[in-house]
Image: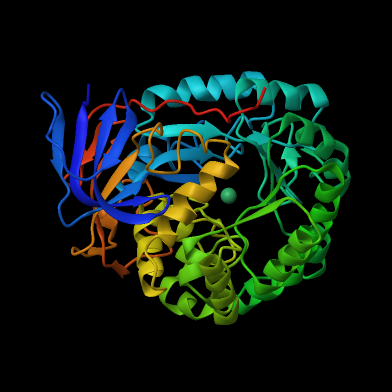
C-alpha cells in the first residue's frame, strides 16, 4: 500500500525533469507518473510548483565523531545534512581512533547509528603499515572505500591522522606513499572498492614550505604541481592494478589536466570537487579570511573556471563538500595557525542548484550530488535517482524562494563557512529518508533513523 504520495512536482528523474507524482511503499519508490487517484491512508504532500529531487549523497564529510565533539558529532552533522537535502553522508576515516580495522569501523557505526538523522557510510583508512587482512576486514565490515592521505603521518600513540608532519611528541608512523599504494592497490582492486586520495605530493609541498603571512604564501606553499603529480603518479599505479582511483577535492586546472590524461590512457578514475572550488577564488580571501582556509587551497579564477567547465561537461562527476568543521576559536587564530577546513554539508545542494541554473541546466545538480556519488559508493541500485525500486530519499525544493546563508540557519556546530553570506535562489522545503519525513517545511522532524549503507558487491 502506498504510504507516501508526493503530488504534482517537477520530478528530476534519470531522464530529466517531468511533472509526475511519486508513490512510495515500504520506503521504496513504486510509481513515478502523472495523475491517478490518491490511495487511502497515504501521506499526501503537495509539491505543486516545486522541484522533487533525489536525496544528495555527500561522499566526503568529517563528522569528527569520535574524537573531536567540540567541533562536530554525528548528531549535528546529520541534522545539517538533512536540512540541506543530503540524505546520505560518507564519513572519512580520520576520526579518533582512525578507522584502520574492522573493529574500529564497527564501533564507529554503533556510535553513529543512534545519532544519525540520515543514512551514512564509512570510509576505511590506508596506513603505510596496513595489512591485507586489515583491508579485507574493513571491506567485510562494510567500508564504502579506502582513503589514503598522502603525506599525512600517523600517530600510533594517539591513533590519529596528523595534519602536519611536525606533530609534537607523538610516536609517528610514516605517511602512506606511492609504495604503499602500489603494494595495496591490487588488494583493493580485488575487493572491488575505490581508493580515494588526498592528492598533494609531499615532496613538492616540502620544497615550497614557507611561513604563511598572506594568502599568496599559502598558494605558493601548495602549488598545483603538487596536485598534478600526486594524481599522475597514483593513476599510473591504479591503471596497473585496475583499482578504481578517486581523486578527492580537485582544486586546480593543472590537476584536472593530469586526471584527464590518465582517463584517456584508460585509468579507472573519478573526480570530485567541492562548492568552495566552484564558487570561490583567491580574490575572496580579503572578504572571508580563515573561513576559506582549506587544503588543497582555493586557487585562481582560472582554476575555478576550469573546474566549473569540467563539472558542466561531465568530466567531474561528483561534487562533495569536504565538510570539515572546527571551533570558532580555532578558526579565529592567526592565518598561519588556523586549521584548514570549512563546514559545507548543509549548503551542498543549494549551491549546486544555483550553479547548475546559471549553467542553464538544473539537472546537473542531482547528477553531481546524487547520481555520480551513488556510483562511487556502490549504491547505484538503491540510491542516486528517483526511479522505481530505489530508496525514497526525496528532496522538495522551492525554486521561487531564496536562501541567504547566515550562521543562524546552520545546524553544524561550526556556523561560519566558506560560502557565508551568499544568496541562492532555492530553498529546501521537505526531505524524506526512505519515505519518512526528516524535514517538513524547512524544519527538522522525527527521530534519528539513519542506517549504515554498504556498497553493493563488496565482501
Ligand atoms: Zn577531507
Q: Position of residue 252 (x, y in %)?
A: 64, 70
- Which one is nearer the viewer's eye here, 98 or 396? 396
Is any atom of residue 241 visible in this view?
yes
Picture residue at 68% right of the left edge, 68% below the top: 256
Query: Where is 258 relative to 455, above or below?
Result: below
Q: Position of residue 396 (x, y in %)?
A: 25, 48
**Relative side of 214 to 266, left or right:** left
Which image quadrant for residue 77?
Answer: top left
Quadrant housing the C terminus: top right
- Which one is nearer the viewer's eye here, 354 or 92? 354
Picture residue at 44% right of the left edge, 36% below the top: 69
- Which one is nearer the viewer's eye here, 272 or 413? 272
**Relative side of 280 to 231, left or right:** left
Q: Position of residue 242 (x, y in %)?
A: 80, 43
- Which one is nearer the viewer's eye here, 307 or 282? 307
Query: Where is 97 relative to 376, above or below?
Result: above
Q: Position of residue 416 (x, y in %)?
A: 37, 58
Is any atom of residue 61 visible in this view?
no
* Count of picture labels: 0
Q: How is the image coloured?
A: rainbow
Picture residue at 14% right of the left edge, 28% below the top: 39
Quadrant housing the N terminus: top left
Which image quadrant for residue 73?
Answer: top left
Amino acid at each position: 500500500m502506498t504510504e507516501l504520495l508526493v503530488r504534482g512536482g517537477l520530478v528530476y528523474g534519470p531522464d530529466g525533469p517531468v511533472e509526475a507524482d511519486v508513490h512510495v511503499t515500504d520506503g521504496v519508490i513504486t510509481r513515478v507518473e502523472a495523475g491517478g487517484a490518491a490511495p487511502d491512508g497515504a501521506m499526501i504532500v503537495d509539491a505543486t510548483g516545486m522541484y522533487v529531487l533525489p536525496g544528495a549523497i555527500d561522499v566526503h564529510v568529517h563528522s569528527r565523531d569520535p574524537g573531536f565533539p567540540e567541533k562536530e558529532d554525528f548528531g549535528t552533522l546529520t541534522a545539517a545534512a538533512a536540512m540541506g537535502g543530503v540524505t546520505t553522508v560518507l564519513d572519512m576515516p580520520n576520526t579518533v581512533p582512525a578507522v584502520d580495522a574492522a573493529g574500529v569501523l564497527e564501533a564507529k557505526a554503533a556510535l553513529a547509528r543512534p545519532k544519525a538523522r540520515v543514512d551514512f557510510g564509512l570510509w576505511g583508512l590506508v596506513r603505510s603499515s596496513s595489512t591485507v587482512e586489515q583491508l579485507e576486514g574493513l571491506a567485510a565490515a562494510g567500508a564504502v572505500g579506502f582513503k589514503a592521505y598522502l603525506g599525512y603521518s600517523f600517530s600510533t600513540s594517539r591513533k590519529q591522522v596528523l595534519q602536519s608532519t611536525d606533530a609534537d611528541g607523538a610516536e609517528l608512523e610514516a605517511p602512506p606513499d606511492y609504495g604503499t599504494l602500489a603494494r595495496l592497490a591490487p588488494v583493493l582492486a580485488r575487493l572491488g572498492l575505490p581508493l580515494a586520495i588526498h592528492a598533494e605530493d609531499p615532496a613538492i609541498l616540502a620544497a615550497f614550505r614557507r611561513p604563511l603571512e598572506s594568502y599568496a604564501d599559502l598558494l605558493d606553499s601548495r602549488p598545483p604541481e603538487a596536485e598534478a603529480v600526486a594524481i599522475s603518479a597514483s593513476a599510473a599505479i591504479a591503471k596497473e592494478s585496475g583499482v578504481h582511483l578517486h581523486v578527492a577535492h580537485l582544486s586546480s586546472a593543472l590537476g584536472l589536466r593530469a586526471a584527464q590524461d590518465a582517463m584517456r590512457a584508460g585509468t579507472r578514475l573519478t573526480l570530485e570537487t567541492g562548492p568552495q572550488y566552484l564558487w570561490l577564488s583567491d580574490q575572496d580571501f580579503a572578504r572571508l579570511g580563515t573561513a576559506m582556509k582549506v587544503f588543497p587551497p582555493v586557487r585562481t579564477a582560472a582554476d575555478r573556471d576550469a573546474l566549473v567547465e569540467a563539472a558542466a561537461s561531465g568530466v567531474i562527476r561528483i561534487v562533495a563538500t569536504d565538510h570539515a568543521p572546527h571551533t570558532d576559536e580555532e578558526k579565529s587564530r592567526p592565518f598561519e595557525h588556523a586549521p584548514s577546513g570549512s563546514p559545507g554539508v548543509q549548503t551542498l545542494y543549494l549551491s549546486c542548484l544555483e550553479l547548475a541554473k546559471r549553467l542553464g541546466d538544473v539537472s546537473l545538480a542531482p547528477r553531481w550530488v546524487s547520481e555520480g556519488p551513488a556510483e562511487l559508493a556502490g549504491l547505484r541500485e538503491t540510491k542516486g535517482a528517483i526511479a522505481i525500486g530505489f530508496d525514497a530519499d526525496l528532496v522538495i525544493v522551492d525554486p521561487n524562494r531564496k536562501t541567504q546563508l547566515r550562521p543562524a540557519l546552520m545546524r553544524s556546530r561550526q556556523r561560519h563557512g566558506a560560502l557565508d553570506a551568499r544568496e541562492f535562489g532555492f530553498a529546501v522545503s521537505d526531505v524524506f529518508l526512505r519515505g519518512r519525513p526528516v524535514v517538513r517545511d524547512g524544519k527538522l522532524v522525527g527521530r534519528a533513523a539513519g542506517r549504515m549503507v554498504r556498497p553493493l558487491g563488496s565482501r
